[in-house]
Image: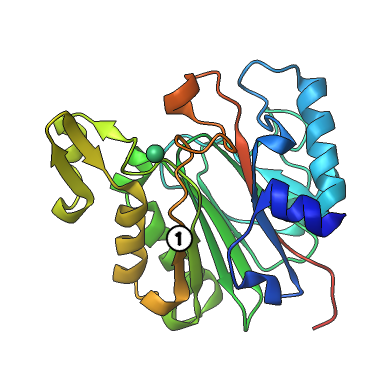
Amino acid sequence: MRKERGLAGLWQVPGWEKYDWLCHGFTTTSFGNLALHVGDGADQVIARRRQLADFLGFSLASWVCANQIHETKIVKISGAHRGSGACDLESALPGTDGLITDEPGVLLACFFADCVPLFFVVPERRIIGVAHAGWRGTVAQIASKMVEAIISNYQVSPGQIQAAVGPSIGKCCYRVGPDVAAQFPEETVERREEGIHLDLKLANLLQLEAGGVDHSRVYCTDICTCCSEQFYSYRRSGSQAGRMAAVIGINHVPK
Ligand SMILES: [Zn+2]
């Protein structure tokens, strides 16, 4: 049952299933809208979060959620943060777009509708992270800053880091104005007859690699959340689109 639901309802980074100490994934619409700020009643959203919590084996009391603002503040999470933002917006970590931890039994969660979810693991040291990279956060270099934060907080080398760029709006559907495009590297921008298309996944991938993460240790999906009905999309549905959750946690298993 868990496996079936896992295949149908939760996107996971191929290859990371081998880490038995790791719990991670990106929800599809089958888990419903998981964010508290887009119109659904809090009770309904909390009930869905509980369902996901049960499915993952991480109680809602262990979740840590950030109030994302398209900037680059990254917070090192400890056990004291457990429950922050799990059931209300007020207790979510303020103005934060990246979370890192080496604490077992904490589930880091960010919410998305087209923006890029970034996942990080340092397998040898059991360190994890997740970040929210929309176009503004990408311009502000959140992917590079996550790599730097992991290195400086845990004294690891960039070569030890594995990263993944998850389901998000693809170049196929992401048309931007010239003012936005001008802030991105040329290879991430494609000028077509009908307008300018931006490859946000590639922009983040380039930052990860520039930060020293080895190309072979970065997975980048080609799933477009706007093309695929399995995901919510801001572009497709507007500001009240449901939000998917990117979650990552360290299971309580003996080292
Ligand atoms: Zn698309």
Q: Position of residue 24 (x, y in %)?
A: 68, 59
* Circle 1: element type: helix
Q: Number of labelled discs?
A: 1
Image quadrant, ligand 1: top left
Q: Residues within 10 Å of mark 1 (few under 14, many from 20)?
A: many
Q: Residue at x 62, y 79 (%)?
A: 123
Is 55 on the left or on the right of 150, as rendered?
right
Is 225 on the left or on the right of 34, as rendered?
left
**Which quadrant would the C terminus be assigned to in this image?**
bottom right
- Compared with 53, 103 (above or below) is below
Is 161 on the left or on the right of 51, as rendered?
left
**Which quadrant would the N terminus be assigned to in this image?**
bottom right
- Compared with 183, 186 (above or below) is below
Q: Position of residue 33 (x, y in %)?
A: 67, 29
Q: Position of residue 79 (x, y in %)?
A: 77, 57
> Between 64 and 247, which is closer to the camera in this rendering?
247
Residue 85 in sight in this render: no
- Compared with 172, 242 (above or below) is above
Give the labeled residue for mark 1. 146
Residue 73 in sight in this render: yes
Amino acid at the residue labelled 1: Met
Q: Residue at x 47, y 66 (%)?
A: 219
Is 254 on the left or on the right of 204, as rendered?
right
Q: Residue at x 54, y 59 (%)?
A: 119
